[in-house]
Amino acid sequence: MLSVNFDLAEQYKRFPKVKVEDVQKIVAWVHVQPHMPNLSEAEVLLFYFACKCSTEITKQVIDKNLTCHTHIEELFSNLNVKSPQLQQIINLTTLLFLDIFIRKDGLQAGYIVVLDQTGFTLGHLSRINVMVLKKAFYYYQEALPIQLKGIHFINVVPFLDKILALLTPFMKKEWHDLLHAHNNLEDYFQYVPLDLMPKEYGGPEVKIKQLHEKSCDMILEKHEEILEYEKMYRINEKLRPGKPKNISDLFGTDGNFKKLEID
């Protein structure tokens, strides 16, 4: 399983509203579920905090998270980070490995996603696999243990409306309400302070390339952990109480998607 890189006692101290006994009760619940792997207290804490300290919602999200890891093969299978295929993906984005960064960060009051559209073309848009996009949005919205506070597009392209037309059908209203498009950085800095930004945007932080390289190095260092995580962090559907689930229970049949057409 993936290691957790934060101090458990320190997290409880930082957020006193989180009660140790409530988290431990959920840990005990997970450990008696015949179809689930045993999660650590630190892992359960991440879910509990992201679910605003609701025990029942935490249980549901843990099940959804494990179910997604079991059935969404495009995101959670063949995770050999040293393979040429995944190396190519990691060089473009590390979003596929958010689970690693969440386990490093510990409890956070919220996350903000910033999408710089510099260099993005209609050609990129036309290559998006709509079914994979749908599955990814389901996982990020329903099963990832974070509280999202905003989604910001900066250096927006003229065809942003086409991008949103593709994305918004898969977004819950709560996510749709978090969308912001900025034609200038001054407007964006009203939401995200300049002192948190990389040098390319005039901030004091290191350059984006260095941040990306650091993230890539972290992923590669956890190569063996990720391979074990891929095998162990799954639901055993044969042991699930009640009816076993499959990919169709999450998304229906894949169906026939029309080819993406760009006017």
Image: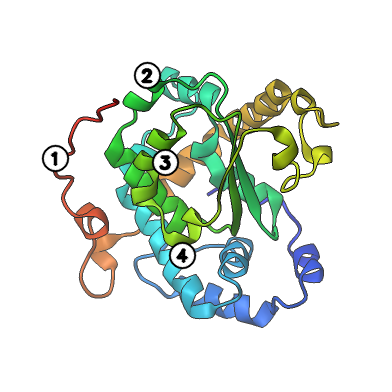
Mark in the foreground, 4 or 2 = 2
> Can you identify the residue that label 4 sits on?
62
Q: Residues within 10 Å of mark 4 (few under 14, many from 20)?
A: many
In the rendered image, the vertical position of residue 206 relative to residue 34, given as above or below: above
Whole-number angstrom distance, CA of label 2 to CA of label 3: 16 Å
Query: Alpha carbon of mark 4 to alpha carbon of mark 3: how far?
Result: 29 Å
Q: Is residue 225 visible?
A: yes
Pointer 4 or 2: first along the chain:
4
- At numbered mark 3, what does the secondary structure look like: helix, strand or loop? helix
Residue 145 appears in which quarter of the rendering?
Answer: bottom right
Marks 4/2 in contact by CB < 8 Å: the verdict is no
Quadrant, the C terminus: top left
How far apart marks 1 and 4 lie (CA) works out to 30 Å
Q: Which mark is residue 256?
A: 1
> Which comes sooner in the sequence, label 2 or label 3?
2
- Where does label 2 land, which residue? 123
Q: Are marks 1 and 4 in contact (CB under 8 Å)?
A: no
Q: State the separation of the CA atoms marked 3 and 1.
A: 21 Å
Three-letter amino acid code at disc 3? Leu
Depth-wise, is mark 4 or mark 3 nearer the camera?
Answer: 3
- Amino acid type, callout 4: Ile
Residue 245, percent from left and from top = 24, 62
Left or right: where 21 falls relative to 156: right
Residue hosting label 3: 164
Q: Position of residue 13 (x, y in %)?
A: 81, 70
In terms of sequence position, does the residue under pointer 1 or pointer 4 come before the other?
4
Amino acid type for the residue under numbered disc 1: Asn
For label 2, the SS is helix
* Of residues 256 and 50, the one drawn nearer to the viewer in this rendering: 256
The residues tagged by marks 4 and 2 sit, at their Cα atoms, a distance apart of 37 Å
